[in-house]
Image (tube, grey):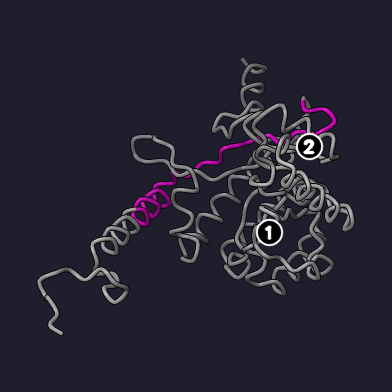
Amino acid sequence: MMIDRKKPRLDADAGDHSPLGVAISEDERATLSLVKDAIGAKRLRLAFQPVVLSVDPGRIAFYEGLIRVLEPSGRVIPAKDFMQAVEARELGRQIDCAALEVGLATLARRPELRLSINMSARSIGYPPWIKTLHRGLSVAPTIGERLILEISETSAMMLPEIVASFMDKVQAAGVAFALDDFGTGGLAIRYFKDFSFDILKMDGQFVRGLDHDRDNRSLVSALLAIGRSFDMFTVANSVETPAEAAALQKLGVDCMQGYLFGAPSLKPTFDIEAAKKTA
């Protein structure tokens, strides 16, 4: 059979030379270049989102600091737009360093705060990140007690033994650990005892429509039962409606986080209130 060589090949063998492959590669290169430039120019900031107590949503238990990249124009780029491209590269480790450095400096500046910072399991073996952690903890004795390190379920399962060993060492300094996006990464239950996470954060996909979705309600109940069995403080992510919040309160979740209680902000309420007091 004759092959028409004038027609473009769109099968798997075309690889990165296909129009789609080239487009994806170019987008990724642009993202990497943007992040690299932002790191060099120190255009990285934390956006703070409150995590509220379920029994009293007017009270904030802690804030989560979410890394943001700023373009030269000042436009804010959320982590979801660049983390996938940089996670497996050194740029990802440098972003973790920047997030931790800013978070620790915030804790040193605001002694009334408790703050969670995201990290990758890959950063445990990155000397600059470890140095940043130890340097920040040494500034004041209470900083470790007010720091929460968040590791996603998927990241924790990449290097479970290394993560567990690291947690044991750092928890001795008072640092707490949160298991983020629980329910999505295939974490084996047997690892719970080895990990000794302090906080369990349920993935938002199980929270959406909880008030009228029986399946999600059953899944959240099961996740909460796991958290209680291992003495873990429970947090529901992505709470967006009063009905979802009411359903979570009824199920007994400890804390809630989501746009219903506040969007991530580069100008958090604790800084605004401090500015008013000094004005």
Q: Which mark is residue 134?
A: 1
Magenta-drawn segment:
31-57
Cβ–Cβ below 8 Å for labels 2 and 1?
Answer: no
The x, y position of residue 9, in whole percent, is 21, 71
Q: Amino acid at mark 1?
A: His
Residue in the picture at 67% in, 27% down: 270
The x, y position of residue 231, in whole percent, is 89, 54
The residues tagged by marks 2 and 1 sit, at their Cα atoms, a distance apart of: 37 Å
Residue in the picture at 63% in, 16% down: 276
Mark 2, Cα crowd under 10 Å, few <14 / some 14-19 / many 20+, is many
The x, y position of residue 114, in whole percent, is 74, 40
Left or right of 224 on screen, residue 123: left
Q: Quadrant of the C terminus?
A: top right
Q: Quadrant of the N terminus?
A: bottom left
Residue annotated with mark 2: 248
Q: Is residue 121 magenta?
A: no
Residue in the picture at 69% in, 42% down: 207
- Precedes in sequence: disc 2 or disc 1: 1
